[in-house]
Amino acid sequence: MGQVVLKRCDSYDDSDVLQALKEVFDALGGIERFIKPGTKVALKPNLVRKKRPEEGATTHPSIIKNLSILIKEAGGIVTVVESPGGLFTTSLLKGVYSYCGIEKAAESSGAILNYDLSEIEIDNPEGKYLKRVTVVKAIKDADIIINLPKLKTHGQMVFTGAVKNMFGAVPGELKAEYHYRMPEYNEFANALIDIYLSVKPSLNIMDAIIGMEGEGPTAGKPRRLGMIIAGEDAFEVDFTALNIIDADPISVPIISQGIERKLCPNKIDQINIIGENIEDVKIRGFDIPQLDTLKSIAFLSRGFLKHLTKKLKPYPVFNYDQCIGCAECMRACPAHVISMNNKKPEVNLSKCISCFCCQELCPQKAVNIKRHPIIDLYIKYRRRKRLVRS
């Protein structure tokens, strides 16, 4: 049985975050279990794109700053490593580090920001789909990786947490290739699991002080949870986080596939929770995407389901009042089915793979995800049944 620490932290004030992180390490046996003098540490935050910290889409700079201070006090050498979505360039990294507040966090804590764009291909014997994985070299150069995910919803994967955050170890342009090669949700979830296994972190510290609900991972709404969730196993951290937001873990492809591969617990009582009582910190009414509901309609035959899925799958819709014509959605599309017409995007829905990279990387929140009315009715029915049961 693994251990997950639940630690209340009500604000991003340095004093609150520093104290919470100290208590997290104490609960896990002390920082010296992970950091020795001279240990090279890669901090892997979620910096999906240029977003202000208060938007709730990226790991808060206070987490990075204060964790770096603790690591350096223990004698470690800290490097922040991330590959955001889109082109992987020095100028893009600099913009993301600056906009997300990470540049200042590094300056005040002595952390190093990685600008090395080198890639390395590594063997992945535990992989199911990916036996070899290309990752940012700086990740593999470290002695240990500390994963710093943000608790958020996700349009395609329902939830993005510790396991999925390691997708950021893959250079930006290659992310699109994985999306296109594995458009089916469970296939892509298995690819994400394979990537996680290839660069498995020693520790996962989830920023759940303010998370994101609704149309995450970038266009949703910030939601205060007031928690830091930490553990050595990313699946256990994610499973715990999903219980806190009162989500069905099996509805998350990464979790369901992790359970099938015997990598993830299937009950919360299989995890040793340290700190807060999980029932005391649960968040009710957290807005969670339910985009792939067709698979749960038991009365549909498999053949008919396949046909119906194509007709009823969720799809992106562009809000032209908010669109600035930057074409970021077109460049981000793995299937290359978005074109620009008079500086406005248009999508070929018959070839859309519903990965929602367009929504994830839109700087203006001008991409909305729409569902067929039949699916909306079914989701309302399921939610009503769930409320009655609870």
Image: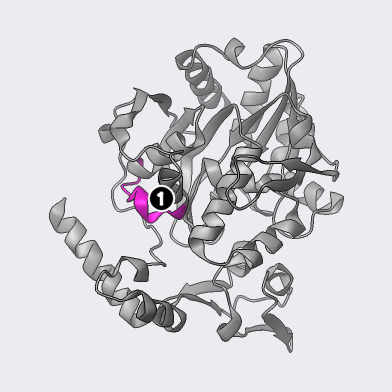
Magenta run includes residue 203: no
Q: Is residue 249 magenta?
A: yes
Using the image as rendered, state which of residue 248 and residue 370 is in the foreground: 248
Q: Where in the figure is residue 228, as x and y percent of width and height?
A: 46, 32
Is there any visible trace of residue 99 in the rendered image?
yes
Q: Is 382 on the left-hand or right-hand side of 258? A: left
Please state which of residues 109 and 274 is positioned toward the viewer in this rendering: 274
The colour scheme used here is one colour
Q: Amino acid at mark 1?
A: Ser
Q: For this view, does 232 lie left or right of residue 38?
A: left
Q: Which residues are magenta?
A: 244-253
Which percent across, then down, holds residue 370? 45, 76
Say which element carries label 1: helix
Q: Is residue 46 visible?
A: no
**Toward which corner of the image does residue 265 lie, by quadrant?**
top left
Position of residue 210 in the picture relative to residue 382 (left or right): right
For mark 1, what is the residue?
256
Q: Is residue 288 above or below residue 241?
A: below
Q: Residue at x 60, y 62 (%)?
A: 360
